[in-house]
Image (spheres, rainbow, N blue to C red):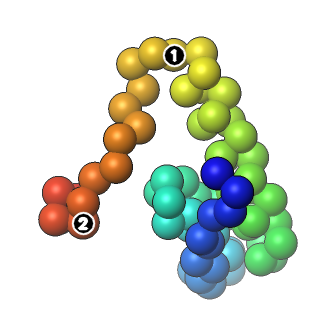
Amino acid sequence: MDFYTVVLRKSGNYWVALCLENGLVGQGNTKENAIEKLKESIDSFGDVCKEESEVYTASLSIKELH
C-alpha cells in the first residue's frame, strides 16, 4: 500500500495514532512518537502475515464490526 490514513487523538497524557485501513494503533508521549509506534506496528504485522498463513486479513464492513 502506498499510503495509510491515520487519525491522531490525545488520550489522557498520551497520543494515539489509529490506522483506518488496518485498525492498528500506536501510542506515544508526542504525535511523532505515536506515529513512529504505529509504523513499527504496521511493519511487525506485515512480518507476522508473511510468516504465518492463518492470519485473517480480509476487509470487514462497519456493520460486521458493530
Which residue is depicted at the point 56% across and 67% down?
A: 18
Compared to residue 57, the image places residue 38 above or below, namely: below
Quadrant of the rendered structure where residue 14 is?
Answer: bottom right
- Mark 1: few/some/many CA within 10 Å (<14, 14-19, 20+): few
Q: CA distance from mark 2 to mark 1?
A: 26 Å
Residue position marked by numbered label 1 in the rendering: 52
How far across and down, in percent of the image, does residue 63 sit? 16, 65
The C terminus sits in image quarter: bottom left
In the rendered structure, find residue 62 and report the number of the disc placed on it: 2
Which residue is depicted at the point 63% across and 64% down?
A: 4
How far across and down, in percent of the image, does residue 50 sit? 60, 21
Element under label 2? helix
Front-most of residues 54 and 36 = 54
Seen in the image, is 37 located left or right of residue 24? right
Which residue is depicted at the point 60% across and 71% down?
A: 5
- Mark 2: few/some/many CA within 10 Å (<14, 14-19, 20+): few
Compared to residue 4, the image places residue 46 above or below, namely: above
Element under label 1? loop
